[in-house]
Image: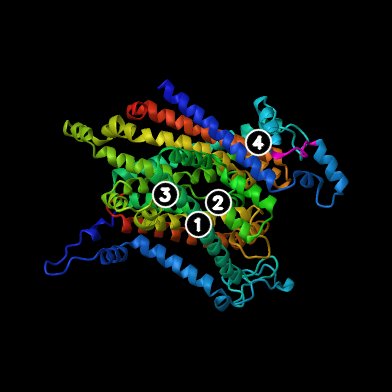
Amino acid sequence: MTQVESFTVAVPEEAAPLTPRQLMRRRALGHTGFLIGAGLIIALALIALFAPLIAPHDPFVQSLSSRMLPPVWDDGGTWEHILGTDQNGRDYLSRLIYGARVSISIGLGAATIGMLIGVTLGVIAGYFGGWVDHGVSFLLTAQLALPGLLLAMALVFIIGPSIWVVICIIGVLHWTYYLVVTRSATQRIRNLDFVAAAAASGATPRQIIWHEIVPNLISQIIVIFTFELGIAILAEASLSFLGVGIQPPTPSWGLMIAEGKEAMFYRPWLVVLPGLCLFTLVIGANLMGDGLRDITAPEGRN
Amino acid sequence: MLKYILLRGLLAIAVAFTVSLAAFFLLNAATDPAQAIAGEDATQEVVETIRARYGLDQPLPVRYAQWLGGVLRGDFGESYYWHKPVAELVAERAGTTITLALSALFVTILIAIPLGAFAALNPNSWIDRVALGVAVSAQAVPNFWLGLIMIILFGVMMPIFPVSGDDTWRHFVLPAFVLGASSVPAVMRLTRTGLIEVMGADYIRTARSKGFRSGALLRRHALRNALLPVISVLAVQLGQKFGGSVITESIFAINGLGRLALESILGADIPTVQMLIFVFAIVFVAMNLVADILNAALDPRIRIG
């Protein structure tokens, strides 16, 4: 809300009016929350991408002689293992770095699957209305009533945990937010003149949806995608923590918290550090989502 | 009004049964329950005996019809794992989870509403920033991690509250805080925007011009109107607390429905999982129905339009 100022910035009289793209860039650069969020996300994405170059050790190599070493700031900590080692003697910093890969790839995968389902249903319901809309609304209500975490746990347990199963199940259970937003946006757009013009010039519903409606939904879809990224990452961490998600020895932050739980009274960093990583990543996604919403729709369209 | 409630009620029942149908097919189609009961190393013969005993040799739609028939008579089947009626298991533990959910909601109200109200009365002040910070952080913090941090803090450093079990009210303090924290952002934001909107309304300006001091103004007019939508959101949040109890109960060793859910999943106890999904869906749908009715009762535009 506080970013409206940059929108009403006085433009010198002789200057050409800003193009929408320039205006958006100006708003983005004046939005502190967005800059912090985007900075966090880009930094963590780079860490995930270049994990093999950054990690000081192999995250899978166990060493019985150096189990649960403390981090460097504690008594007995060494620079060899800056954040200490876990219960199997694996370097904790390296596992945290590789953990970013797991969280981000699962988040991206699940948010994409949810997007495909939600946007498809939302556009169809919003465009066709009537019975189609009633049917989709019913589906939405039923999905909202499903205890998502419980069903996800049961399904992962039954099907057998693998990274793909986790991605698909989280994705299939997280599409309602896309549906709600794209449905009402489609209802609004389909009554605008340019859609009527396209229909009058003989465009089929398929052409109207792809060429007139979907391009106008993209900024809203990106905003939701960013929020859903955070939600999916937390969902994966919860499943892995409960033992029905990513399985050892893969370094998932949620799983690392579960593994560190046994020793958390003597070695609290085993639990604290992966949690802080999750918190940073999700807060980055949320701040970026909030910022993108302000930047793309400063008039408060939603 | 009665017609509106009736329609909503019918829809809620239809939704609950759709959820049970979806859960039934997903859970049963993805696995062989007989194999799960018998265990991995069981001989084919044992598996077949179990299949016949639990009626698992019937086709899936027939089994759903049987399940549904049972449910309508109050019979949810027998647990594969605990070997007793599922309904009995759930009844034993429901009280604990209801206590937890209600105390969590109380925590949410205690934190979110004052914070939202102070933020709305002083927009862009430090308290507004604190409130925003709390909302953003509470949304990003993994719930299970917050629970463990509480256990580390209160288990070792400040042993004021017990960190495990469900014997006294003191056992519920930390779990209620953890479970309640997840609803703080939504309720806080709604209180804040609602109150800001109300404070700008004409009737508040009139009251102010008549010489009302802001304290009395807030009590008499603003807060009451701003909190109307918050009440229905609280009902929805309460409905979600039951599903959310899985993590909190397993961390704090509370013997309620959430822990039962985790145990029955790890024990491949499909009838229990099936009933819990149904019960959680019913609670959610019922709380949404309450929210809808509250909305309609408080706002004539909804029930007439």
Q: Mark 1 falls within which chain?
A: A
Q: Which residue is mark 4?
A: B275
Question: Which residue is at the front of the view, A186 or B288?
Answer: A186
Mark 1 vs 4: CB contact within 8 A:
no
**Residue type for callout 4:** Met
Tags 3 and 1 on a common chain = yes
Q: Which residue is mark 1?
A: A111
Earlier sequence position, callout 2 versus callout 1: 1
> Dot 1 lies on which element?
helix
Q: CA distance from mark 3 to mark 4?
A: 34 Å
Mark 3 vs 2: CB contact within 8 A:
no
State which quadrant residue B245 falls in: top right
Q: Residue at x 62, y 55 (%)?
A: A241
> Where does the magenta region start and end?
B54-60
**Residue type for callout 2:** Val
Tags 3 and 4 on a common chain = no
Q: CA distance from mark 3 to mark 2?
A: 17 Å
> Dot 3 lies on which element?
helix
Earlier sequence position, callout 3 versus callout 2: 3
Q: Which residue is mark 2?
A: A172
Q: Position of residue B133 (x, y in %)?
A: 40, 53
Q: Mark 4 falls within which chain?
A: B
Q: Is residue B225 above or below residue B251?
A: above
State which quadrant residue B256 falls in: top right
Q: Residues within 10 Å of mark 1 (few under 14, many from 20)?
A: many
Q: Is residue A28 above or below residue B75?
A: below
Q: Which residue is mark 3?
A: A123
Q: Residue furthest top?
A: B2
Specify the principal SS of the magenta part. loop
